[in-house]
């Protein structure tokens, strides 16, 4: 196997501009991921708009109140980070292929913002979720994304 390529030329924009609507159903990829990962959402007792995410990375629950601060509490993680993908060959993909990769539901997961930030662009060789029960599944998911 070859090592990593340099990050020369990498920018987030190389993988598309923001969150498009890949399935053209009126909802962007970020909100598609939230809808999928919050499909078993529960509501805080006594409220009508405070959802709870069972965060896979930490194994804890996160109260989500709709509003400006939600984006920092819950982020959409690229299981295989875009900059890491760039270093491992995505720079050779077409723009359309990179955008499809960045918005592939297999590669997207709603997760705790702080934990996602701590992960940065690490892969399974350099970062594993604090939730030890998820580690094997996480490694398998990274492998599946890279194989796809």
Image: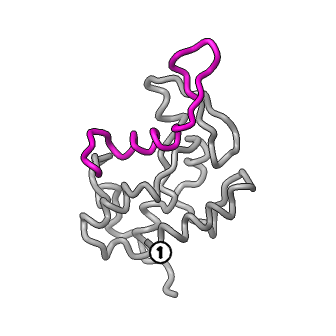
45 or 125: nearer the viewer = 45
Which residue lies at the image location 57% right of the left edge and 36% below the top edge?
40
Q: Quadrant of residue 94?
A: bottom left
Q: Secondary structure at mark 1?
A: helix
- Seen as rendered, the residue at the extreme front is 40
User: Which residue is label 1 attached to?
Assistant: 147
How many labels were placed on the picture?
1
- Seen as rendered, the residue at the extreme top is 46
**Left or right: residue 10 compared with residue 125:** left
Up-down: is 148 above or below 112?
below
**Left or right: residue 86 compared with residue 114:** left
Which residue lies at the image location 29% right of the left edge and 55% below the top edge?
13
Which residues are the magenta region? 22-51
**Left or right: residue 108 compared with residue 116:** left
Label 1 crowd (10 A; few <14 / some 14-19 / many >=20): few
Where residue 8 appears, as percent x and y from the top left, is 36, 70
Where residue 107 appears, as percent x and y from the top left, is 46, 58
């Amino acid at each position: 196997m070859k090592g990593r390529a340099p990050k020369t030329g990498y920018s987030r924009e190389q993988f598309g501009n923001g969150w498009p609507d890949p399935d053209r159903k009126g909802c962007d990829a970020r909100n598609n991921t939230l809808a999928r990962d919050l499909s078993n959402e529960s509501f805080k007792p006594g409220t009508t708009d405070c959802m709870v995410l069972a965060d896979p990375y930490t194994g804890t629950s996160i109260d989500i109140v709709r509003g400006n601060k939600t984006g920092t509490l819950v982020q959409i993680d690229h299981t295989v980070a875009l900059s890491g993908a760039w270093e491992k060959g995505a720079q050779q993909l077409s723009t359309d292929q990179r955008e499809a990769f960045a918005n592939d539901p297999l590669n997207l997961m709603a997760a705790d913002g702080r934990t996602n930030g701590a992960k940065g662009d690490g892969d399974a060789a350099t970062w594993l979720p604090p939730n030890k029960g998820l580690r094997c599944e996480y490694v398998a998911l990274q492998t599946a994304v890279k194989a796809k």
